[in-house]
Image (tube, grey):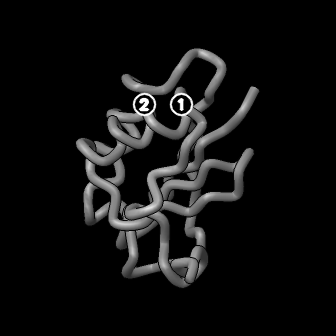
Amino acid sequence: MSEVWVCQFRSCSRDGAEMVSAALQESAPPHIQVVPTGCLGLCGSGPIVVVTEDDCFYWRMTPAKSHRMAQEHLVGRSPVTEYLHPRLHPPGP
């Protein structure tokens, strides 16, 4: 089973991580497990969501962004590039 991690630590929690986690629970396909985590080391950029299978780090996630990411990435297998953390996924040429 693939996992999607959702940081629930201080700043991510303060910025709505619980709502992001709930949105992903609603939207993720059955073979994806949404897992709450502690700090992922990107404080101030959250809520952070990690699609572990593809090593994709999404930043500043909202419930609406989570629904879109679930459909396009988890179902359609195409990462939503504009939501990827730019420090970890620099834009290509």
- Mark 1 near mark 2, Cβ–Cβ under 8 Å? yes
Question: Spatial distance from mark 1 to mark 2, Cα to Cα?
Answer: 6 Å
Image coordinates for residue 12, horizontal then vertical, percent: 37, 65
Where residue 87 sits, quadrant-wise, is: bottom right
Q: Is residue 14 left or right of residue 81?
A: left
Q: Is residue 50 left or right of residue 26?
A: right
Check the image and name the residue furthest to the front.
93
Image coordinates for residue 56, horizontal then vertical, percent: 61, 58
Q: Secondary structure at mark 2?
A: helix
Three-letter code for the amino acid on which mark 2 is drawn? Gln
Residue displayed at 75% across by 26% down = 1
Image coordinates for residue 10, horizontal then vertical, percent: 39, 70
Residue displayed at 27% across by 65% down = 14
Q: Secondary structure at mark 1?
A: loop
- The numbered dot on residue 76 is 1
32, 14: nearer the viewer: 32
Q: Is residue 9 above or below residue 63?
A: below
